[in-house]
Image: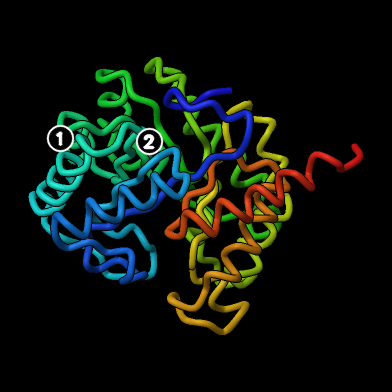
């Protein structure tokens, strides 16, 4: 199985670069050209197979609204700045079709839409028009508290139906760890249930992308701030890989790749 030209015979790493000062993990934010280029080159050297650019935070618990033109400016600046320095696929993390389109024109290769083609109705049209792969996150209006994993699968099936209707066939699915915030069960239990049963997403027949890096559920479990959540992130990453994740989205490429390699090798010896 391949995604954006990258062979997924073994799990791959997607390095996260933010140019959004409002992002929850401040150390991931790059504010000038040198910082941006240095960070991307280091990620690729450390083993990243993809780079994901975020020009506006999508964290559901933060106030992240910025003018659309500002998101476009950030996205185009970041993508065009790094395009000549790396030959790995670049993903644009956005919920707005105009941002996605301008980023693609600047050199982005993948659309990463946390609304799963359910937010901006034109997003799927942009993906189809430019023939780019898409990462589709589980996105649902109503939350099934009793059965999180099947709710996620149903939400992803809806997104895949939209993609297929427009001929967007190259898709990775993301269970949206950290985006569902039910009052009960607590969201850290919700996210843990999804990771524990991640292998069930294989029924969709698409690569599974998981982003757990330094997220709030790890903070609740460990009692640590974002800058102190590396160890917890690596533990969650190992669980995700053991349960079938093919792409891991992370702020910490080198350390995460080590965790992926260990989990993947151990997984090979599992019976059944």
Q: Callout 1: few (<14), some (14-19), or many (20+) C-alpha neighbours within 10 Å? A: some
Quadrant of res 58: bottom left
Q: Position of residue 65 (x, y in %)?
A: 20, 62
User: Dot 2: what SS?
Assistant: loop
x 48%, y 67%: residue: 214
Residue reaching furthest bottom? Answer: 223
Quadrant of res 18: bottom left
Q: Position of residue 28 (x, y in %)?
A: 33, 64
Quadrant location, the C terminus? top right
Image: 193 above or below 228: above
Image: 171 above or below 213: above
x 44%, y 44%: residue: 48
Q: Disc 1 vs disc 2: which is toward the camera? A: 1
- Residue 264 appears left or right of 143: right
Q: Nearer the viewer, residue 90 or 210?
A: 90
x 68%, y 33%: residue: 202
Residue of label 2: 117
Residues at marks 1 and 2, CA–CA distance in whole angstroms: 17 Å
Q: Are marks 1 and 2 in contact (CB under 8 Å)?
A: no
Q: Nearer the viewer, residue 141 or 216?
A: 216
Q: Position of residue 137 (x, y in %)?
A: 47, 43
Q: Is residue 155 visible?
A: no
Q: Is residue 267 visible?
A: yes
- Residue 136 appears left or right of 210: left
Residue of label 1: 102
Image: 259 above or below 175: below
Q: Give whichever of discs 1 and 2 has the lower sequence position.
A: 1
Residue reaching furthest right? Answer: 271
Q: Nearer the viewer, residue 181 or 271?
A: 271
């Amino acid at each position: 199985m391949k995604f954006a030209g990258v062979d997924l015979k073994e799990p791959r790493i997607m390095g996260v670069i933010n140019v959004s000062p409002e992002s929850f993990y401040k150390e991931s934010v790059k504010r000038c050209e040198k910082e941006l280029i240095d960070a991307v080159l280091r990620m690729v050297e450390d083993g990243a197979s993809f780079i994901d650019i975020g020009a506006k935070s999508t964290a559901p618990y933060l106030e992240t609204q910025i003018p659309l033109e500002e998101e476009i400016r950030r996205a185009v600046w970041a993508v065009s700045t790094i395009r000549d320095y790396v030959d790995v696929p670049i993903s644009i993390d956005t919920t707005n079709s105009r941002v996605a389109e301008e980023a693609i024109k600047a050199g982005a290769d993948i659309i990463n839409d946390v609304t799963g083609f359910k937010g901006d109705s034109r997003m799927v049209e942009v993906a189809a028009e430019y023939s780019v792969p898409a990462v589709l996150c589980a996105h649902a209006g109503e939350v099934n508290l009793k059965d999180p994993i099947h709710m996620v699968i149903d939400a992803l099936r809806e997104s895949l139906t939209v993609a297929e209707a427009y001929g967007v066939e190259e898709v990775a699915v993301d269970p949206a760890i950290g985006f569902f915030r039910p009052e009960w069960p607590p969201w850290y239990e919700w996210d843990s249930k999804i990771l524990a049963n991640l292998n069930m997403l294989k029924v969709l027949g698409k690569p599974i992308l998981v982003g757990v890096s330094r997220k709030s559920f790890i903070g609740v479990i460990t009692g640590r701030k974002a800058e102190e959540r590396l160890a917890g992130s690596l533990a969650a990453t190992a669980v995700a890989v053991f349960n079938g994740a093919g792409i891991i989205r992370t702020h910490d490429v080198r350390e995460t790749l080590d965790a992926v390699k260990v989990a993947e090798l151990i997984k090979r010896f599992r019976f059944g």
